[in-house]
Amino acid sequence: MYRLTALVTLLSLAFYFFTCINVSRSRTRTGVKAPAISGHPDFERAFRIQMNTLEWMPIFLPSLWLFAIYISDPIAAAIGAIWIIGRIAYFTGYSQAAAKRGPGFAIQGVAAIALWVGALGAVVMRLV
Amino acid sequence: MYRLTALVTLLSLAFYFFTCINVSRSRTRTGVKAPAISGHPDFERAFRIQMNTLEWMPIFLPSLWLFAIYISDPIAAAIGAIWIIGRIAYFTGYSQAAAKRGPGFAIQGVAAIALWVGALGAVVMRLV
Amino acid sequence: MYRLTALVTLLSLAFYFFTCINVSRSRTRTGVKAPAISGHPDFERAFRIQMNTLEWMPIFLPSLWLFAIYISDPIAAAIGAIWIIGRIAYFTGYSQAAAKRGPGFAIQGVAAIALWVGALGAVVMRLV
């Protein structure tokens, strides 16, 4: 049950894990040593990419699973895959410059909100 | 199943999402541009409100669901609703001044710990 | 169902909660007042311990549960217990000096990745 959603969940964790490793590598490249979290703009952008991905995990994962449970496993997984694509675009853009973080952010935001709205609609319909 | 807990989960995500948007708006108002996360006390408080809410999500959400599964869906949802109310009070107080963040923090803390203690008790009772 | 995994989940939340309280106590000891998150190396290490634990929660918890559901509750719980032990070692080491954070970090990293790899293997095997 929910195998596609489970697969997309694990892939989203892998991508998030990659943004964490990228911060470590950025520490080596820029010389910003732990526990400092500022000191070089390249490091700060790498750190913010990880943080922003972390910040969206508690919106994305519960919405994804409630959508899968109350509506559909394959549709939840498909929208979840779009979320990951948006996150990759956000990573690529923001790594280059803060001004290029918009499109990827918008894609993942729309995907996450679609999951949330769908789940809320399905839950409310069963309650009334 | 667990419809009330699902509803409270989605509402807590909506409130958390609101604290994230509030950080973006605070960047515009105070002129603290991404990726910086300091530079103006109003921005720093807005950022800490979001961060503190994020920090409590992994305590709140798993405790809420384990309480719902092992004890009761409506009781979990009711305590979860108190958590959201505490978070709103924390947001309102901390937005004004750091010294006013106490009461809301206490309410959400007691609610989260009640969910955690209840879930632990129910799990341990079934194991022994 | 999944009682051992539920128990390990609640214990991991308790440990994470302890790292949060440790930040509050460190504020009192070092005089770094909220909303500041820098200003004293002892506080910064305490803050980074909490943050790093938070950063790994969305990797650990979903991998733990997908492993429990698709493979085994007691094995998931056992690996999850190793994760908590690694986190405690990370806390103890990093509290003394940034250079001593390696071994605990490695233990919890291997445990989390084992949960992730196991869950992915089990999900992929059911899909093909």
Image (cartoon, coloured by chain):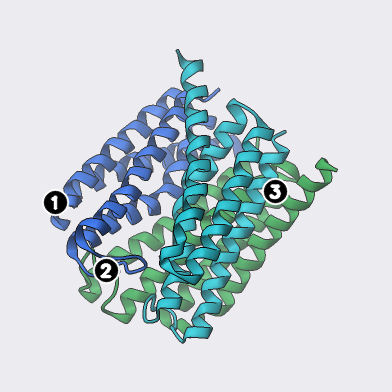
Chain colours: A cyan, B blue, C green
Q: Identify the residue position indicated by label 1 in the image.
A: B96
How many numbered discs? 3
Chain at numbered mark 2: B
List x then y, in percent, for residue B117.
Answer: 42, 41
Residue A54 appears in the rendering:
no
Q: Kindly report the distance in space between the C-alpha atoms of the residues bearing marks 2 and 1.
A: 17 Å
Chain at numbered mark 1: B
Q: Which residue is painted at 30% across and 42% down in the image?
A: B108
Tag 3, which secondary structure?
helix
Is A122 placed above or below C96 here?
Answer: above
- Within 10 Å of the Cα at label 2, are there few (<14), some (14-19), or many (20+) other Cα atoms? some
Q: Which residue is painted at 62% across and 67% down in the image?
A: C109
- Amino acid carrying label 1: it is Gln
Tag 2, which secondary structure?
loop
Tag 1, which secondary structure?
helix
Q: Nearer the viewer, residue A106 or B88?
A: A106
Q: Quadrant of residue B24?
A: bottom left
Q: Which mark is residue C67?
A: 3
List x then y, in percent, for residue A52.
Answer: 44, 58
List x then y, in percent, for residue A106.
Answer: 47, 49
List x then y, in percent, for residue A100.
Answer: 46, 63
**Left or right: B92 in relation to A28:** left
- Within 10 Å of the Cα at label 3, are there few (<14), some (14-19), or many (20+) other Cα atoms? many
Q: Nearer the viewer, mark 3 or mark 2?
A: 2
**Left or right: C84 in relation to B86:** right
Is A124 placed above or below B88 here?
Answer: above
Q: Identify the residue position indicated by label 2 in the image.
A: B38
Q: Quadrant of residue B80?
A: top left
Chain at numbered mark 3: C
